[in-house]
Amino acid sequence: MTIVHFTPLQALIGGLVIGMAATLLFALRGQIFGISGFFGGLLHLKKGDTLWRISSIAGLILGAYVMHLIFNTPAQFETVSTTRLIIAGLLVGFGTRLGSGCTSGHGVCGLSRLSARSLVATLTFMAAGFLTVYLFPAN
Amino acid sequence: MNQNIIVFLTSFLFGAGLEISQMNNPNKVYGFLNLTREWDPSLAFVMIGAIALTSSAFHWIKIKRIKRGLPPIMGTKFMLPIRQDIDWRLLSGGAIFGIGWGLGGFCPGPAVSGLFRNQSELYIVALSMFVGMFIYALVDKFILSNETNAC
């Protein structure tokens, strides 16, 4: 193993901003910042339960866009093949719903709450991620 | 304050954090998961930064408000997950998500917050993710919920 492309300062600052978001949503609205849950609920339309989820999508995109303008981050990303992206997206969508959470809900918020369920979920998806990249490297 | 505005503003911050930390970039995520070859530890530092702040804040909110029976500052009640059990859904869901995460380098937040890039590959990821969630909703409704009833 060699260490490459490490950006500790950006990572820490970005992490703190993510933590601020999770803190404020919990303190102000009493809600756990669980993005897969926010999105998943869009698929069963219930009255009064949709607009806030759309507000979240708008906020996520706009927040990232403003930082892109300020810090001049890449305009496009290199990605894996289309077939691989489709399989990846399907598995991420299905898996996060089945496992009741993703990197935000289980990873950031769950670990911060010292939830055993979230710790197990986070260790599981991290291990699966490491193993997948080990077995199927992108290039 | 209107609840939609709270969600919008906090999501704005979350998206900003993802872009600052470069976690919207699938190559940074892939680099973290590529542990045995060329490893980029950045994602671990994002988690450390986020959890350091959130865990202290959650602890403080618990003492200052939840234990005193107070509601959130601008909401009606704290919505805390109540489940404690570790079941096959949690484990297999985590594993399936992890495989998808490793294959593409996207988790749900970055699959959406990077969409301003107007790049076709990113739309494909976001759309596939929503289709995956929809398939889950169908499977849950027609297959899994029957199984629960049977037990």
Image (spheres, rainbow, N blue to C red):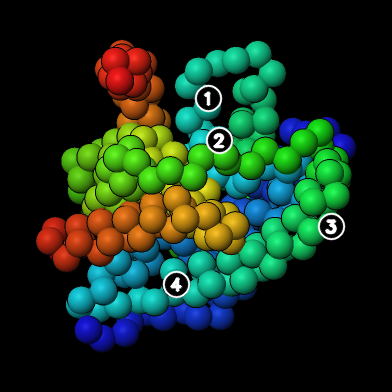
Instruction: Specify the label residue B64 is tagged with.
Output: 3
Instruction: Specify the label residue A42 is tagged with.
Output: 1
Disc 1 and disc 2 in contact, CB within 8 angstroms: yes
Chain identity of mark 2: A
Q: Amino acid at mark 3?
A: Lys
Disc 4 and disc 1 in contact, CB within 8 angstroms: no
Q: Is residue B58 left or right of residue B81?
A: right
Which residue occupies 50% across, 74% down? B45
Residue sitting nearer the eye, B65 or A80: B65
Disc 4 and disc 2 in contact, CB within 8 angstroms: no
Q: CA distance from mark 3 to mark 2?
A: 27 Å
Q: Are marks 1 and 2 on the same chain?
A: yes
**Is the residue marked by circle 2 packed among few (<14), some (14-19), or many (20+) residues within 10 Å?**
many
Q: CA distance from mark 1 to mark 2?
A: 7 Å
Residue sitting nearer the eye, A121 or A130: A121
Chain identity of mark 4: B
Q: Position of residue B75 (x, y in %)?
A: 81, 37
Disc 3 and disc 4 in contact, CB within 8 angstroms: no
Helix, strand or loop for disc 2: helix
Disc 3 and disc 1 in contact, CB within 8 angstroms: no
